[in-house]
Amino acid sequence: MSTTTVANHEEHHDHPTGIMRWLTTTNHKDIGTMYLTFSLVMFLVGGSMILGIRAELFKPGLQLMNPDFFNQLIGVHALIMIFAALMPAATGFANWMLPLQIGAPDMALPRLNNWGFWLLPPSAILLTLPFTLALFGIGDGALATGWTFYPPLSIQGGIGVDFAIFAIHLLGISSVLGSINIIVTLFNMRAPGMTLMKMPMFAWGWLITAFLLIATIPVLAGAVTMLLTDRHFGTHFFNAAGGGDPIMFQHLFWFFGHPEVYILLLPVWGFIPQILQTFSRKPMYGYKAQVYSLWAIGALAVVVWAHHFFTAGMPVPALLYFMYSTMAISLPLAVLFFCWIKTMWKGSMTFETPMLFAVGWIILFGIGGLTGLVLADVAADAQYHNSYFVVAHFHYTLFAGGIMGIMAGVYYWLPKMTGNMYDEKLGKWHFWLTAISFNLTFIPQFFVGLAGMPRRIPDYALQFAEFNMISSISAFALGLSQLLFVYVIIKCVKGGKKATDKVWEGAEGLEWTLSSPPPYHSFTEQPIVK
Amino acid sequence: MQVLKKIGLGLAAMLTSLNAFADYSWNFPEPVTPMALDTLHVHNKFMLITMVIFVVVLAIMIYSIFSHRKSKGYKPVADKAPSTVIEIFWVLVPFVILLLIDFVIMGIPAYHSVVMMEDTRDKATMVIKVTGSQWRWQYEYLDGDAQGIKFVSNLTTTADQQHNAADKGENYLLEVDNHLVLPVGEKVRILMTASDVLHNWWVPQFGSSRVAVPGFIRETWVQVDKAGTYRGQCKELCGKGHGYMPVVVDAVPMDEYKVWVAAKKAEIAKAGEIKEMTKEDLVAQGKAVYEKNCAVCHQVNGAGLPPAFPAMTGSKIALGPVFGADGKYLKDGHLDRLLNGKGVMPAWKSTLNDTEIAAVITYERQALGNSASVDPIIQPAQVQAARQ
């Protein structure tokens, strides 16, 4: 690794200003900021869609929308939250923090980085444009098949399906580009002395995520392309009448879809231990065990996909294989949970907002994990599958495990990024409001699912009414609490108490050796890691 | 801490509910088949185990959160990784516990449940075929006395109830015109398929759930051990009517079942008779067929929901000719579209009988503002001839 490439970057720049700065930037912090801002905006867009759904489900009967529009909202909500809110948030952190954490001046492939981001806004527009077109009488609205695109329903669907397919293509290219960039950066630009087994855990989480993305995104792209040719060019991949099989799509989709869950979570599993060690003032416990567990989860992720459709019909040996391999995921997760809690154990803990989110995250993600273990049981899955029990389960993993993890990261790194401390009191309010309203939204959904309410129905039988009403009211509280989050971020960006370089008393790592905010080109001199 | 308390309360409620078999609203509904009973046991056992793990881990965390605080002056210890044998032992404990749960405590019973669930043929005394269509279920009895019985089961909840213009009935959205009738205590093998998109035939109290795949036969079985009426729903997103295709099953003692079979057979034979009908009879019957099957998309008044679901009023197809000069039905004509479908429009040839098809075409040509159409009246015999 070269240590001689450093020049004084501060002088020979004339940055474009205004919009051109953001369109043409190749700086990892600018691009990271754009990813995070995009993610926050789309989080609010996807959130308002689901509030429309919860308002409709507030009581039995059709109040606000017709069933077709209802189906469009649920599918687009999921696609936006997964592809346009959670994934870009993780990529935003990767852009901002990976070079700082490994002592690099920037990402390895800055132009690719710029392109990777600028593919996102067009794909978000593609996803949501059919809603607007429908207002003008063009087409019949957005994708109405749920985010899973299952044929033959998606073959029947209108132009919304085509728009979503192209959006998936663009999002996929963006993710693969980002992944290549991260792998190249981590393999080539680490500070001298930083061996792979000395990399920060966040870098490990992202490295495995990047490999998973490169392995699975092309399969999804292929599957939706086959769908496109079935729709328009007379192929029969998923049509039994032409020798195809609709269930083959589910295999292809979930070969991507299950690893996708870990793609969303691995970066979070990376930085949560860093937050825990900072606020416990004690080194991370079992670094090696955590790294090996992350690898184990990455490997298991690509061999368990069919547990998403046990009820579609499979031979008994296949059912048993997918059941037992899915249960095996709990083993590395048990090691991770142990290490997280052991990092806190006998530390000297304080509970600033990032730590509150991290601890709340362990508990709530634990519920998501344990209910996932139950779902692996084929016999019981026949009851859980496609009921509200599953909806509650995956919101515990993806909202609590994903989004609340991201929020912990935002509060943890915001002072470093902006140079200002956020409002601690409001941050704590945000945590408690989010955690409480989240639980009140989704605990009732476990019960209503067990009682037999299927997901994705616009109207329901009277016996489900009470739980749905509680869930809807809480969902609005959850949604409104996020406005506080936006306010705290804006307030922090605009000013506030100046942050020190180290920001947190117990912070360890290269990113805390730079000023807050860090200079435009991170490390002008490569640090040496002992 | 409020949130922990709240979760604690929620979990306590869940825990107590596990034993409170009298009140099923916090758990699965009362099981009435061997499979549902088995599923409930698996679920309860699993829930209990995961709840114990959760509470123990949470207790350890809460202890740590309150004791190992900076504000209490607690000094951090510096352990980075297990070093002594006893520490390595503690690291392996959670791993081994989960290994045991996964592959012994839950793994072994799960194996037996799967084998039981998938054994659809042993001791099955009858076979029925269930076909999912947008948005109704069709049932066909394939063997025994009931062989040949075939009917469609449609939602009967009125549009007024759905749009809050009328009070909702007790079985809102879970009521149909023709119930599936099964004898109590008999193992029934169910063959499952679909005519358009994926559906999933699900009655929570039966514990069986299987996706109906167009072009393929999937199978499952039920053995209802308690007489009663059981209600469920489609649980695979199948389009805009997904929430409106319930499953209703009557489980009755064998002697009652035999009476029902005889009556149903007679009823079907009578309905299948082809006879010349008056315009008024056709329109009256056609109105009923239309409102039951077509109004979901084309609307009761024929306005449709364009562009996905075209208006019936003023439609070229409904106004244009049905038969060509050679006496055969025209391609892309009214009868062709109804029999064979196109795109989102389902094919009705195996769902409606000749009389029903003749009636609904006549209705669409007489009412809904289409009285000026060519070929104003279609007779059942013409449909019967067209099918050949």
Image (spheres, grey):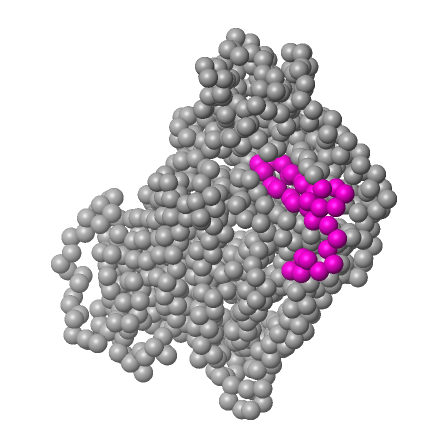
User: Looking at the image, which residue is at 26% across and 63% down?
Assistant: A107
Left or right placement of residue A39 versus residue B382 in this view: left
**What percent of the width, then of the height, locates residue A499?**
38, 62
Find the residue positioned furthest to the bottom: B85
User: Looking at the image, which residue is at 55% across and 86% down?
Assistant: B88
Asked if B282 appears above or below B28 in the picture, the reply is above
Viewer-proximal residue among A308 and A182: A308
Find the residue positioned furthest to the right: B255
Viewer-proximal residue among A253 and A503: A253
Q: Quadrant of residue B229?
A: top right
The N terminus of chain B - image quarter: bottom right
Left or right placement of residue A100 versus residue A368 in this view: left
**What percent of the width, then of the height, locates residue B357?**
60, 24
Q: Can residue B242 be seen here?
A: yes
Q: Quadrant of residue B106?
A: bottom right
* Residue A195 among magenta residues: no
Left or right placement of residue A504 versus residue A310 in this view: left
Asked if A296 appears above or below B21 in the picture, the reply is below
The C terminus of chain B - image quarter: top right
Asked if A342 appears above or below A68 in the picture, the reply is below
User: Looking at the image, which residue is at 29% across and 57% down?
Assistant: A177
Left or right placement of residue A419 versus residue B176 in this view: left
Viewer-proximal residue among B332 and A323: B332
Find the residue positioned furthest to the left: A12
User: Looking at the image, which residue is at 59% across and 64% down?
Assistant: A316
Per the rendered image, the range of residues in magenta is B118-147
* Residue B137 among magenta residues: yes
**What percent of the width, then of the height, locates residue A164?**
40, 43
Q: How many marks?
A: 0
Q: Can residue A33 be seen here?
A: no
**What percent of the width, then of the height, locates residue B347?**
54, 32
